[in-house]
Amino acid sequence: MSITSVGQTGGSTTSAADSQAKLTENFDTFLLLLTTQLKNQDPLNPMDSSEFTNQLVMFSGVEQQIKQNQNLETMIQLQQVNEQAAVVSYIGKYVSAEGAQAPLQDSEANWTYALGEGVTNTKLQVVDATGKVVYSQDGEIKSGAHTFQWDGKGTNGEQLPDGPYTLRVNATDRDSKAVGTAVGYVARVTGIGKSDVGPVLKFGDMGLLLDKVISVEEDPASAS
């Protein structure tokens, strides 16, 4: 999925506009040929006009189809503009979504995780973009939903840079068998973008499709 920032527009014309230009060129050529043939026809043996009539009907039909395509492209463009205008209101707000990767923003990252029944040991590990475990601690063992807020400090206490980090939740029962978990995150929207499949909310370098948002709140505590 490619993501571009809002406001970027292509410099090429639309396909309908290209088709219209080509049709006009072909029609002009057709008229020139028709005029030339009419000027040079034998007055005593005039050309059959039915073929020319069929050609004119064909040009008219193609022109109508192109106009319909132009109207459709205009409607799509207006819809895209309206969608982008609507998502602007998300900037600065906190959204929650499913996924283990979350952005560290201003030295703070917020996750949620849910545990199944029978957990006796839970280990939380924060992994950076290279796959390295930079922080770990014990987690909750009670079944249900829990929150985990990380201050961006590594295991040895150093402050790590903002960016995407992944939370691993390893939960086991008394027999050391894995118990099912689910992970989500809460993040502040810093910008918006667009992709080939729809509007995108951006958290620094991270992006989230608008239809993947679970909830939107003014503060992270409400979105958790």
Image (cartoon, rainbow, N blue to C red):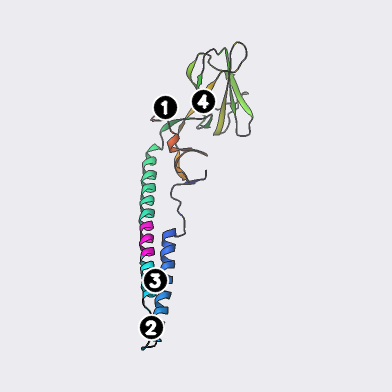
Q: Residues within 10 Å of mark 2 (few under 14, many from 20)?
A: few
- In the figure, 204 relative to 79: above or below? above
Q: Quadrant of residue 13?
A: bottom left
Image marks 1 and 2: residues in contact by CB distance under 8 Å: no
Q: Nearer the viewer, residue 39 or 145?
A: 39
Residue with the most extreme top position: 174
How far separated are the C-alphas under marks 3 and 2? 15 Å
Q: Position of residue 183 (x, y in %)?
A: 51, 25
How far separated are the C-alphas under marks 1 and 2? 76 Å
Label 1: which residue?
A: 223
Q: Decide which of tag 1 and tag 4 comes sooner along the chain.
A: 4
Q: Find the magenta span and give its range.
A: 61-70
Amino acid type shown at disc 3: Gln
Image marks 2 and 4: residues in contact by CB distance under 8 Å: no
How far separated are the C-alphas under marks 4 and 3? 64 Å
Label 2 secondary element = helix
Visible residue check, residue 70: yes
Which residue is found at the position 42% from the left and 67% from the top? 23
Q: Position of residue 177 (x, y in %)?
A: 61, 16
Residue 38: numbered disc = 2
